[in-house]
Amino acid sequence: MIQSYKQNPTVQENYDTIIIGSGMGAMATGAILAKEGQKVLILERHYTAGGFTHIFKRKGYEWDVGIHYIGEVQRKGSVMKSLFDYITDGQLKWADIGNVYDRIIIGDKSYDFVKGVKNFKKQLVSYFPEEEKAINDYIGLVFKAVKTSRNYYISKALPPVLNALIGGFMKRPFYKLADKTTYEVLKSLTDNEALIKVLCGQYGDYGLPPKQSSFYMHASVVRHYFDGGSFPIGGSSQIVKTIDPVIAAAGGTILINAEVAEVIIENNTAKGVKMSDGKTFYAKNIISNAGIMTTYNKLLPENIVAKHQLKAQLQKVKRSVAHVSLYVGFEESPEALNLPKTNHWIYPKDGDHDSCVNRYLKDINQEFPMVYLSFPSAKDPDWSNRYPDKSTIDIITLVPYETFEPWAGSRWKKRGADYEALKEKIAQRLLAELYKQIPQVEGKVKYYELSTPLTTQHFVNYEKGEIYGLDHSPSRFRQDFLKPKTPIKNFYLTGQDIVTAGVGGALFAGVLTAMAITGKNVLKKVIK
Ligand SMILES: Cc1cc2nc3c(=O)[nH]c(=O)nc-3n(C[C@H](O)[C@H](O)[C@H](O)COP(=O)(O)OP(=O)(O)OC[C@H]3O[C@@H](n4cnc5c(N)ncnc54)[C@H](O)[C@@H]3O)c2cc1C
């Protein structure tokens, strides 16, 4: 049972493993370790568990923060579906969001990404008939990049000696495509910039435009959604609700309102954690799901950070983008408003993605480089049972953290009139984008609230509001330290930073961390 640290929770005398943070990576690691018989304590600083899978409720509505669609979970036998079934004892159910999972809108043209790789290809060829070969070759490279990633990731969980022996060999094929940018690979297939712009229409899923992102990251997202997108029935909060009993069955506990201040380390061995109120918990293994930046900058003692030159490691990676999200509420059902399930990605008519992003990052009054519309209430078949005659829409765009930096250090809800005025200006711009695409909702908005990078900082503890942890550039995938094992004995990492952003990435990070701790190939068990 999820309990609040502030309300005298029932805790065990001893835990086998403590996990800092309760994101997807933490929940997956915790559930797998629980199935291996471990008593796990998950400590979450927020008032609700789940990391970016958490929901929040306001004025009779509910919004999902970091889940709009997940791929590969409808297909029986897929690794993703098997993993979710394993860690939730089959209790988490998914709703297919339909044939067209993403619509890419560029100026006044729109392009549908259709479920099923053959349909995807056919649809794209219908838009760009002269590019059939390039499209075919592109799909081949997407599969190739993803295929070569398997050994790359498995090598991250190998014991150091084995990794030294065969790790390089396992990773080499992966680097062939991961070392290149998305644009480099696409440009090698076609000179058609319009096609390239469409193919990169999901770059918002990892936050980095094609001239900066690794082709592997692009391919992994594209491949992930080839079979369509799905949404958790009952909303994202079902993820933690269905994992909690699995952890509890082995004597484990999830505590919310439980902020860890520091990892306790003696003789270069992690022993426990000190909470922000000074209390301590001890366990054999300590795992951080708080992101590598927060972990190394804030949670480890300075002498340990210096001893292992961990700050030098952080210099080699960059934080991902920050975002604003407008949560909008209506007092009519999704059916009455005729809301689609398809995600809408809206891009400027002119310029490639990189130049649109660069122009906007210099001056956010320029055209948004990307606006994303998601319709969670329409995607969830259980929504109207919980919220009859209501619906919600999320509208997201990128924003530099620096835009909101002047208010850093101010308190949530008390950041002042000029902060609110800036938010209002952005909110109105985003609503105008919504009305262009979904005109039937104009005049019907009953509630809206804009989150900023400071909201992400406040609730999920990413220092600069970076939504995807680390940037997914080619060099990120060259960093050997982005793996479960750290130079500190019994201290491990999990979550999006050691694999990739995305619920699937964080979930798989959970598998790798559980493998590194137990020394067992838990994946074999899951797939069986
Ligand atoms: C707007 C948005 C939309 C997204 N949409 C999708 C989508 O449609 N599909 C998809 O697959 N992915 C999506 N993602 C990405 C996905 O949600 C994340 O990549 C994934 O959930 C990250 O999981 P994680 O395990 O790294 O942990 P996180 O979710 O990052 O959680 C880390 C947790 O650690 C806690 N923590 C930090 N410091 C401490 C401390 N000192 N003490 C205790 N706890 C601490 C934090 O409060 C947080 O709960 C989206 C993300 C965002 C932001």
Image (cartoon, grey):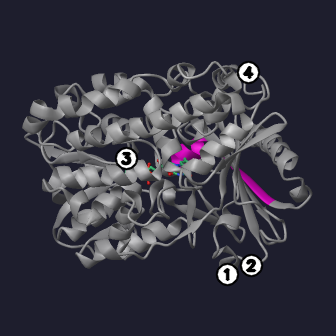
Q: Is residue 192 left or right of residue 13?
A: right
Give yes or no for contact between labels 2 and 1 (Cβ–Cβ under 8 Å): yes
Q: Nearer the viewer's eye, disc 4 or disc 2? A: 4
Specify whether residue 456 is painted magenta.
yes
Q: Which residue is label 2 attached to?
A: 388
- Amino acid type, mark 3: Ala
For disc 3, does the CB lie below 8 Å from ligand 1? Answer: yes
Q: Residues within 10 Å of mark 3 (few under 14, many from 20)?
A: many
* SS category of the residue bearing label 1: helix
Residue drawn at 72 percent across, 40 percent down: 126
Specify whether residue 346 is painted magenta.
no
- Amino acid type, mark 4: Gly
**Nearer the N terminus, badge 1 or badge 4?**
4
Boundaries of the magenta span:
447-458
Q: Which mark is residue 500?
A: none
Q: Which mark is residue 351?
A: 4
524 vs 356, nearest the viewer: 524
- State whether residue 234 is above or below residue 455: below
Residue 107 locus on image (x, y percent): 82, 33
**Nearer the N terminus, badge 3 or badge 1?**
3
C-alpha gap between disc 4 and disc 2: 43 Å
